[in-house]
Amino acid sequence: MKAAAVQDDLGLGGLFPMPVGTDEELLVGSLSLLDMEEKIISPELKACLKQADEEGNPVLVFYNLK
């Protein structure tokens, strides 16, 4: 599967995170907002950027494949 083919609620598309773990039936990926600042279209994630810095924690994304 290609990342660009992923449909998501956050509008990340090609920035889809590779899984780094699992939580029951969900896959868990992490995103560094600072690496993709110009590509974020989600208002919620843009709001997180105002508080993000180099030392901050990544955003964890929980998802499943359908």
Image (cartoon, grey):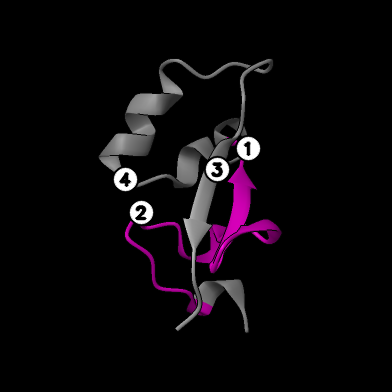
What type is the residue that disc 3 sits on? Answer: Leu
Q: How far apart are marks 4 and 2 (CA)?
A: 6 Å
Instruction: Name the element at disc 4.
Output: loop
Name the residue tied to disc 4: 42
Does residue 54 show up magenta in the picture? no
Q: In percent of the image, x 62 and y 25: which residue is there?
A: 57
Q: Is residue 50 left or right of residue 34?
A: left
> Counting residues from the N terminus, which is met first, the one under dot 3 or under dot 2?
2
Position of the N terminus, as image quadrant, is: bottom right
Instruction: Report the residue marked by disc 2.
Output: 10
Q: Name the residue under label 3.
A: 60
> Measured from the top left, where is residue 7 in percent x and y?
39, 73
**Looking at the image, do the residues carrying marks 4 and 3 touch, with CB atoms under 8 Å apart?**
no
Q: What element carries label 3?
A: strand
Q: Quadrant of residue 34?
A: top right
From the image, state whether disc 3 or disc 1 is nearer to you. Answer: 3
Alpha carbon distance from label 3 to label 1: 14 Å
What span is colored magenta in the figure? 5-32
9 versus 65 height, above or below: above
Q: What residue type is labelled 1?
A: Asp
Sequence-first disc among 4 and 1: 1
Which residue in the protein does label 1 denote? 35
Asked whether disc 3 touches disc 1, contact meaning CB atoms under 8 Å apart, the reply is no
Residue 66: numbered disc = none
Q: Residues within 10 Å of mark 1 (few under 14, many from 20)?
A: few
Please determine whether, in this image, residue 2 is positioned above or below residue 26: below
The residue closer to the viewer here, 50 or 64, is 64
Q: Nearer the viewer, mark 4 or mark 3?
A: 3
User: Counting other residues with Cα less than 10 Å from the Cα at mark 4, is it few (<14), some (14-19), or many (20 or more)?
Assistant: few
